[in-house]
C-alpha cells in the first residue's frame, strides 16, 4: 500500500541546487513527489519556500527516502519533539540512533529548538534535559545513561547554501580540474586568508611530507612566522623530515639543493629523530638550539600548537607524536574548534581524518598533485572541500608571496 508524507524546504534552495538534489534523490530511490506550494524569493536576500508530498510504495521505502531528504535540509511541517533513549552502557547505542551530518543541526525538545554543539559527521546527539543543551558526541565518548536522540523526528539539518553575495570564495566550486589557472586561485586564497585574519578568525593547516620533499618548507615556515596559521595538523613524517632538512639539508637522504643522494643520507631522518628524543621534545630541541629554522621551529617560536598523529609505519617516532589514535582524535577535535578555514596539502590520510571532524561551514581547501585525492576527500563526506590540483612546491611559495604584502602578525 502506498505511503505519503509532506515535507518542507526553505532557504536559497534553488541557487544552492538543493531543490534539484531533492527531486533526483526521490526519483532515484523509486519514489514520486508533488509540489503543493512553491514561493520563490524575488530579491537576492529573499529565501524560497517549497512544500512537497513525497510518495513511496510502502512506509519502509518512504522512511528511507525521508531519511535521505532530511540530510538535504527537508523537514516535516508539524515537528514532534525528538525521541530519546538512554545508552545501555559505555559505547553501546540504543537501536535507531540518529547519526549526524557535518551540517549545523538543531534538536526539538520541550517544544524548543536546541542547537547541537561541536557538530561533525557520523556521530550522535546527546541531550541534557536539565540544561536543555545538545552535544555531538563520537561513539567512543558515549557513556551509560546518556540521552541519545533516536531517529530523524525532531531533528533539523541546515545544509550550506551558496551565498548570493559575491566574495573571495565564490570563484571556486568543489569540482576538481588541473586546467584551472593555479596562480589566480592561489592569489584569491591569499586574499581570503587575509580577510579571515583581519576579522579575527583562525586558520589551520594539514601538511604532509611532500611539503619538505618539494622544498616548500621555507615558504610554510614564513607563512607561520607572519601569523597566518593558528594550528598545524600533521604526522611523524612532516616533522621528522622538516627537522632532518634543517639539520642536514636532506629529506629522506636526498640533498634538496643538488637533487643527489647524500653519503650516508639514508640514516639522516633517524639521526634527526634521535636528536629530538635526546632533547626530550621538539620544543626543548628548539630551546637548546638543535633546531634553528623550519616549520616546527616557527611553530614553537610563535606558540602555534601542533597535533602530530602517529601511524603504524612511523620511524621513531618523535616524542611529540601521539601514538594512541583515540587521544590523537581528541586533540584534533579540540584544536579544530573555532577554525574558519583549513588548508590541506599533500596528505590524503590526515586530510580525511581532519575533514571528518570539520563542520560543513568551515572553508576547506585541499591541495594535491593528484586530482583523485581531492575527489576521495569529497567522497568521504567533506563535500565542502574545494580542490586545487597543484604541487606543494609550487603552491606554498606562491601563497607566501601573495600573503607577504601587508602581512598580519597574529597576537599570541
Image: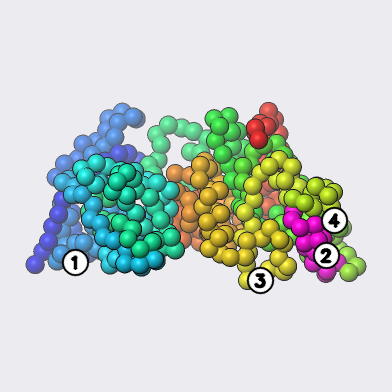
Left or right: 372, with 261 as reference point: left
Mark 1 vs mark 4: give the one in front.
Answer: 4
**What residue lies at 20% left-to-right and 43% top-to-bottom?**
111
Viewer-side residue, 178 vs 19: 19
Stretch in magenta = 265-282
Is residue 283 in sight in this rendering? Answer: yes
From what the image shows, is residue 396 above or below residue 373? above
N-term mark: 2 or 4: 4
The chosen color scheme is rainbow
State the residue position of label 4.
Answer: 247
Is residue 180 in sight in this rendering? Answer: no
Q: Residues within 10 Å of mark 1 (few under 14, many from 20)?
A: few
- Which element carries disc 3, helix, strand or loop? loop
- Residue 313's tag is 3
Is the residue under label 2 in contact with that under label 3 (CB below 8 Å)? Answer: no
Q: Residue furthest left?
A: 1
Is the residue under label 4 in contact with that under label 2 (CB below 8 Å)? Answer: yes
C-alpha separation, residue under disc 2 versus residue under disc 4: 9 Å
C-alpha separation, residue under disc 4 versus residue under disc 3: 23 Å
Task: Name the quarter where the N terminus is drawn.
Answer: bottom left
- Where residue 123 sits: x, y (%)? 39, 58
Mark 2 vs mark 1: give the one in front.
Answer: 2
Is the residue under label 3 in contact with that under label 4 (CB below 8 Å)? Answer: no
Left or right: 179, with 144 as reference point: right
- Residue 60's tag is 1
C-alpha separation, residue under disc 2 versus residue under disc 1: 61 Å
Task: Name the quarter where the C terminus is drawn.
Answer: top right
Amino acid at each position: 500500500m502506498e505511503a505519503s508524507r509532506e515535507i518542507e524546504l526553505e532557504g536559497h534552495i534553488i541557487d544552492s541546487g538543493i531543490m534539484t538534489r531533492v527531486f533526483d534523490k526521490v526519483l532515484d530511490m523509486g519514489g514520486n513527489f508533488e509540489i503543493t506550494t512553491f514561493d520563490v524569493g524575488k530579491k537576492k536576500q529573499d529565501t524560497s519556500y517549497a512544500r512537497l508530498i513525497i510518495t513511496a510504495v510502502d512506509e519502509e521505502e518512504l522512511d528511507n527516502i525521508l531519511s535521505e531528504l532530511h540530510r538535504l535540509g527537508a523537514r516535516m511541517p508539524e515537528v514532534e519533539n525528538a525521541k530519546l533513549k538512554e545508552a545501555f552502557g559505555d559505547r553501546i547505542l540504543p537501536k535507531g540512533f540518529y547519526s549526524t551530518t557535518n551540517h549545523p543541526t538543531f534538536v526539538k525538545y520541550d517544544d524548543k529548538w536546541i542547537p547541537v554543539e561541536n557538530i561533525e559527521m557520523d556521530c550522535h546527539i546527546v541531550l541534557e534535559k536539565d540544561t536543555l543543551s545538545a552535544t555531538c558526541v563520537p561513539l567512543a565518548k558515549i557513556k551509560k545513561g546518556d540521552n541519545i536522540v533516536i531517529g530523524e523526528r525532531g531533528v533539523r539539518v541546515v545544509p550550506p547554501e551558496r551565498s548570493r553575495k559575491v566574495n573571495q570564495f565564490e570563484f571556486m566550486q568543489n569540482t576538481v580540474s588541473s586546467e584551472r589557472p593555479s596562480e589566480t586561485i592561489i592569489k584569491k586564497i591569499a586574499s581570503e586568508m587575509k580577510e579571515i585574519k583581519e576579522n579575527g578568525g583562525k586558520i589551520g593547516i594539514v601538511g604532509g611530507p611532500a611539503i619538505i620533499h618539494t622544498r616548500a618548507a621555507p615558504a610554510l615556515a614564513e607563512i607561520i612566522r607572519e601569523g597566518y596559521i593558528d594550528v598545524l595538523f600533521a604526522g611523524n613524517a612532516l616533522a621528522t623530515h622538516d627537522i632532518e632538512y634543517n639539520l642536514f639539508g636532506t629529506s629522506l637522504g636526498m640533498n634538496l639543493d643538488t637533487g643527489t643522494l647524500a653519503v650516508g643520507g639514508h640514516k639522516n631522518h633517524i639521526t634527526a629523530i634521535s636528536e629530538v628524543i635526546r632533547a626530550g621534545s621538539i620544543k626543548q630541541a628548539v630551546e637548546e638550539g638543535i633546531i634553528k629554522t623550519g616549520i616546527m621551529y616557527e611553530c614553537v617560536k610563535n606558540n602555534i600548537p601542533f597535533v602530530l598523529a602517529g601511524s603504524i609505519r612511523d620511524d621513531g617516532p618523535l616524542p611529540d607524536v601521539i601514538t594512541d589514535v583515540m587521544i590523537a582524535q581528541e586533540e584534533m577535535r579540540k584544536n579544530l574548534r573555532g577554525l574558519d578555514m583549513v588548508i590541506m596539502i599533500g596528505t590524503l590520510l590526515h586530510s580525511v581524518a581532519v575533514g571528518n571532524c570539520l563542520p560543513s561551514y568551515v572553508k576547506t581547501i585541499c591541495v594535491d598533485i593528484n586530482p583523485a585525492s581531492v575527489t576521495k576527500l569529497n567522497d568521504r563526506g567533506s563535500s565542502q572541500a574545494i580542490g586545487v590540483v597543484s604541487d606543494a612546491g609550487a603552491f606554498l611559495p606562491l601563497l607566501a608571496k601573495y600573503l607577504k604584502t601587508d602581512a598580519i602578525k597574529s597576537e599570541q
